[in-house]
Image (tube, rainbow, N blue to C red):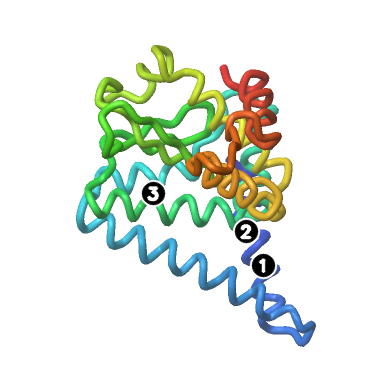
Amino acid sequence: MAVALVAVAVPWVVALWLLNGESGWSLPAWLFVGGKGLMLLSTAVATVVRPRQAIQLFVARYRFDRHTLHGLLQASTRFGWELPQTAIGYLIAQWRVASGRVKHIETLDGVTFVAGRHREPHTTAGMSLGCFVQMWLPRRAGENCERWAWHGGNEMVRHEYGHTVDSQLWGWLYLPVIGLPSLVSQALDLNPKARHRHDDFWVERRADRLGKRFFT
């Protein structure tokens, strides 16, 4: 917890210092403050609509892996090094909560899986941003994400967990190096004329390897 408190405080100290100085880095500082403001606003809106789930998501930001070394890594990177994707993932999760599209929230080894129903009865989809994994599950998954993770959907859970490990490694480069190429690959996979297989893309194969190594 001490590591997390330091990790939370340091970006704020740096941002305030940049805003008060004349270093020419005021824009990133304002982006940081603006992002935090949006996160606070989304939390407030979701709390009014569905307080239990909104508060559960807020608390999840401060939950880490029980294993000491990986938990320390998560605590030290989540609030600064991984800030862009973590903030976006949190905003999307709270928006889904506020719109009533979240059926279950489960935190496994410091990663929070936000599960809802897919429009198609047998279709599954996932998207990892920071420590938040957005999941759209088939109806057979039931309400409990953890139970589903160990029965039938475990490959997907491990895969998305692998993306969260990449987020810790790449930091601010995660979105342009990992996230955007993965999104383009998925779009090509949906186009039959492209003859592209998303699961064979290097970003996805890498997530599979990392997920099998870290997910317990």
Circles 2 and 3 in contact, beta carbons < 8 Å = no
Task: State the image coordinates of residue 86 (x, y, percent, origin top left).
Answer: 54, 51
Residue topped by disc 1: 13
35 versus 27 height, above or below: above
Residue topped by disc 3: 93
Residue drawn at 64 percent across, 48 percent down: 181
Packing grade of label 2 (10 A; few <14, some 14-19, many >=20) is few
Counting residues from the start of the chain, the first of labels 1 and 3 encountered is 1
Seen from the viewer's position, the closer of residues 206 and 91 is 206
Label 2 – label 1 distance at C-alpha: 6 Å
Label 3 sits on a secondary structure element that is: helix
Residue drawn at 35 percent across, 16 percent down: 147
| Farthest bottom residue in view | 22
Packing grade of label 3 (10 A; few <14, some 14-19, many >=20) is many
Amino acid type assigned to the residue bearing label 1 in the image:
Val
Q: Does 101 sit left or right of 65 as displayed? A: left
Label 2 sits on a secondary structure element that is: helix
Q: Nearer the viewer, mark 1 or mark 3?
A: 3
Q: Does 19 sit left or right of 91 as displayed? A: right
Residue topped by disc 2: 9
What label sits on residue 97 in the rendered view?
none
Label 2 – label 3 distance at C-alpha: 24 Å
Amino acid type assigned to the residue bearing label 2 in the image:
Ala
Residue 119 lies in quadrant: top left
Label 1 sits on a secondary structure element that is: helix
Amino acid type assigned to the residue bearing label 3 in the image:
Ala
